[in-house]
Image (cartoon, rainbow, N blue to C red):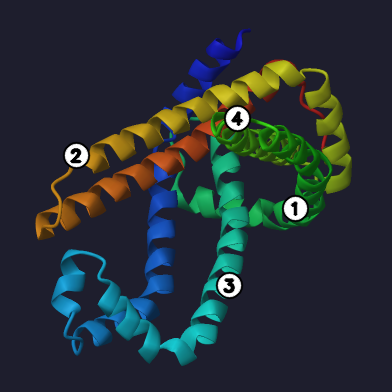
């Protein structure tokens, strides 16, 4: 079966579980409100007493930023700690939600209840959390051993160029190489998660080894399918940027329109995440026979 056929099957699966994207968006929206509320109250208090507050509502005003920075400079460590803690909680939340996504996509039937979603989140959480810690060294190794030498080679070639074009091309190539390498690692561990859920295995290391053999034997097909799903995300992002560019500028209506469009984009991003897992599940179903639980 071609990757295009598998992509269509994954898209149909994601569409049949489209409520997953809405659930993910809702959880992330509530989490974002909890994170930004303290900062929002601080900004609101500053705007209420700042002479440049009115201008800051219409555009980013450097004088207001100076006032705000001076007043809250001593609170910088607090805000930094708050954001770091929020980032850590977000990573754990992402691990938790991945179980619900894969579990619901793997369930038979066209609809899954909210209780089933959170049941799967909890069921696979500890396995996925162990896998998350296992994946951290892999990301570091990929960046350290593969990306840095390639980036150094591109920088060396750019320094020897007589015009600025090679430097510009090298910069774009560095970004592309980094994205592809990180995507490669992400794809592999996504398939490990799918294997842990579909086979019911609780042994993370064993499942990682089985997935390595599985993906290695079908690498180009798996990678092509992953890139095809990634292309859908890129097109969605380009559409978002193009529409955001033409929205009216500097008005309260624009703020409302931009906020609504951003939320639609974030909802689309959540659907893209579901699509990544859905195409992976279809790929595994096509090529891998179920194994007994260990």
Distance CA(mark 1)–CA(mark 4):
45 Å
Which of the two labelled residues, at mark 1 and mark 3, occupies the earlier sequence position? 3
Please indicate whether residue 41 sits to the left or right of residue 275 in the image. Answer: left
Q: Height in image: 153 above or below 61?
A: above
Residue 15: quarter of image: top left
Task: Identify the residue position indicated by label 1 in the image.
Answer: 127
| Label 3: which secondary element | helix
| Category of crowding for the residue at label 2, using alpha-carbon neighbours closer than 10 angstroms: few (below 14), some (14–19), many (at least 20) | few
| Label 2: which secondary element | helix
Pair 2/3: label in front: 2
Which of the two labelled residues, at mark 2 and mark 3, occupies the earlier sequence position? 3
Which of the two labelled residues, at mark 3 and mark 4, occupies the earlier sequence position? 3
| Label 4: which secondary element | helix
Distance CA(mark 3)–CA(mark 4):
37 Å
- The answer to whether one can see residue 171 in this image is yes
Q: Height in image: 153 above or below 80?
A: above
Pair 2/1: label in front: 2
- The answer to whether one can see residue 203 in this image is no
Task: Identify the residue position indicated by label 4 in the image.
Answer: 166
Distance CA(mark 2)–CA(mark 1):
45 Å
């Amino acid at each position: 079966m071609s990757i295009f056929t598998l992509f269509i099957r994954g898209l149909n699966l994601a569409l049949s579980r489209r409520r997953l994207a809405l659930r993910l968006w809702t959880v992330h929206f509530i989490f974002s409100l909890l994170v930004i509320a303290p900062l929002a109250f601080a900004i609101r208090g500053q705007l209420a007493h700042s002479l440049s507050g009115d201008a800051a509502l219409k555009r980013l005003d450097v004088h207001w930023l100076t006032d705000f920075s001076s007043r809250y400079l001593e609170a910088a460590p607090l805000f930094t700690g708050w954001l770091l803690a929020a980032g850590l909680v977000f990573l754990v939340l992402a691990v938790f939600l991945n179980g619900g996504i894969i579990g619901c996509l793997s369930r038979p039937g066209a609809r899954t209840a909210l209780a089933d979603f959170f049941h799967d989140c909890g069921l696979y959480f500890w396995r996925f959390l162990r896998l998350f810690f296992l994946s951290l060294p892999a990301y570091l190794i990929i960046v350290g051993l593969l990306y840095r030498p390639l980036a150094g080679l591109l920088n060396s070639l750019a320094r020897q160029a007589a015009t600025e074009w090679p430097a510009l091309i090298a910069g774009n190539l560095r970004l592309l190489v980094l994205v592809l390498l990180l995507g490669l690692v992400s794809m592999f561990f996504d398939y490990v998660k799918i294997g842990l859920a579909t086979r019911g295995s609780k042994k993370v290391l064993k499942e990682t080894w089985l997935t390595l053999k599985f993906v290695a034997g079908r690498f180009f097909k798996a990678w092509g399918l992953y890139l095809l799903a990634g292309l859908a995300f890129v097109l969605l992002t380009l559409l978002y940027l193009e529409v955001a560019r033409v929205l009216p500028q500097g008005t309260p209506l624009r703020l409302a329109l931009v906020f609504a469009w951003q939320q639609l984009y974030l909802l689309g991003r959540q659907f893209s995440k579901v699509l990544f897992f859905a195409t992976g599940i279809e790929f595994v179903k096509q090529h891998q026979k179920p194994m007994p639980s260990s």
